Amino acid sequence: MTIQEEVEKLRVEARKLRQTDAIQKRSWDQQRERAEKLKSAIDELKKENQAQAQEISRLNDLIAKLLNIKDKFAGMLFKTNLKSDTSKKSTTKKRGGQPGHIGSGRKKPIHIDQEKEVNLSHCPYCQNELAQSNNFYERIVEDIPLLLSTLATKYSIQRQWCPHCKKEVHGEPKDTLPGFRLGLNTIIWIMFQKYQLRLPLNLIVKSLKEQYNLEITTGAIQNILHNLQTKFTPKYKQLIKEIRNSQVKHADETGWRIQGQNAWCWMFSSPKSILYTIEETRGKAVPNKILGANPQGVLIRDDYAGYKKLPMEQQSCWAHLIRVSKELADKENASVEMQSLNQILKEMFVELSDIISKEFVQIERDRAYRIYQAKIQTIIQTPYTQKDVKEVQIRITNQNTNLITALKYPNVPLTNNEAERNIRKMVITRKISGGSRSNAGAATHAVNLSVVKTLALKKQSLITSLRKLLTHSRQKLVLEETE
């Protein structure tokens, strides 16, 4: 091979080497770019993981607070959806009483009304005649009579003369009320069916006919209820005084119908009394009338404007506020601002609930009041831009420090759930009966139901308490437990 050929061969090999070098260099540059991008992505993921870890830590703290006071949240607006720990070994524990558990059943009655002996004359399997034995076992059965008949009693009431008063006097038969053609047991039974079971009058008429063979019209029952209202009216006025004097009181209202026209049922309550009134208006004059010109104590209420100008301390209901906030935050198009504010409100409610659950210490409550007053002002002054969050902000602006009045006084709840439960009784009645057929019927229902529900609030037996009230000496219908 000549020198020229050798040079040409070396040139070709050098060219290939330069091409290979260029390819490797480009590949190295591409790998370096890719490595830089991966490193940048890893840094971003690390930052995101740190943020998520902080959020998880915050949520764990919130869950711990919720679990500490979970008994206070039974039946409220939001609940934790904590699932059981699936990592733990599953158990085969059966539902119900466990081995060694002391069972409980219906207790035997103290008094036995009658005794009967049961025996067979023939075997139920082979029909063979059986001899009698002296071996017995006992079985006690309690039952109610299926069909009863009314007991009509004719009283011969003696007219007597009092030489001292110079007046004719006479006695009142036991278990009767003056002016009533039906006995006390029947009257109390009607009240129980009407106000405790919420039965309409036509079903009460049918029940009396089927069970007791007692024929009566709906008009006659309504007259009985009107007469009872007259007897209960003085005690109804006492309920108004008791609510006015109470340091903690609730109020709520719902729609009602009188002869097909719109009206309003108002409910006012204290720890010892419940009062209903049915009015043609939802105006502020109603709470002014019930609570008086100079109302005392703290009123727990929703955000209805009719209470706003009452000259008294007020606690706005957090349940209503959080319900509205949660509904807006759960929408598909909810803004980030709305979701953030909803979280803030829920955390505030948990913290406030924890504070008021502890013993009342004035210095600590004053400090907490200042802190949460500042938090509310921060929410009010935040320049939100989204429409949904502004709606909640306006609500908070209108209620302002009424949201934290419970911090200033002992035994004041943050929600108006007590009123919601009490007003629901009237809502159910309205759905069953459709309302009242007259103004007199509405007034009767409000007065009688107020007395009945006050007795229930005091955990007294309705039948026993009504009998005691209606048979009290000279018809003094006293609601006090001591009497």
Image (cartoon, helix red, strand yellow):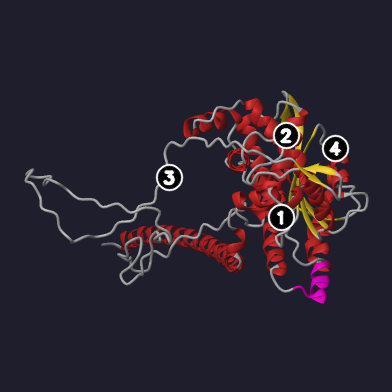
**What residue is drawn where x is 56% and y is 63%?**
40
Marking on residue 283: 4
Q: Distance between the residues labelled 4 and 1?
A: 22 Å
Q: Considering depth in this image, is 279 or 394 the residue closer to the camera?
A: 279
Position of 252 relative to 212 (above/below):
below
Under circle 4, the secondary element is: loop
Position of 132 relative to 437 (above/below):
below
Q: Are marks 4 and 1 in contact (CB under 8 Å)?
A: no
The spot of residue 439 in percent (x, y) is 77, 29
Outermost residue, right side? 293
Image quarter of the N terminus? bottom left
Position of 177 relative to 27 (above/below):
above
The spot of residue 138 in percent (x, y) is 28, 59
| Amino acid bearing label 3 | Ile
What are the residue bounds of the magenta stretch?
A: 360-369
Q: Nearer the viewer, mark 3 or mark 1?
A: 3
Position of 201 relative to 232 (above/below):
above
Neighbour tally class for label 3: few under 14, some 14-19, many 20 plus, Cα within 10 Å = few
Tell me, yes or no, whether the highlighted magenta stretch contains residue 436: no
Q: Considering depth in this image, is 402 or 278 the residue closer to the camera?
A: 278
Q: Nearer the viewer, mark 4 or mark 1?
A: 4
Please tell me whether the stretch drawn in magenta is mainly helix, strand or loop. Answer: helix
Q: Are marks 3 and 1 in contact (CB under 8 Å)?
A: no
Q: How far apart are marks 3 and 1 (CA)?
A: 43 Å
Marking on residue 226: 2
First of labels 1, 2 by sequence position: 2
Marking on residue 52: none
Q: How far apart are marks 4 and 2 (CA)?
A: 27 Å
Question: Pointer 3: what residue?
Answer: 144
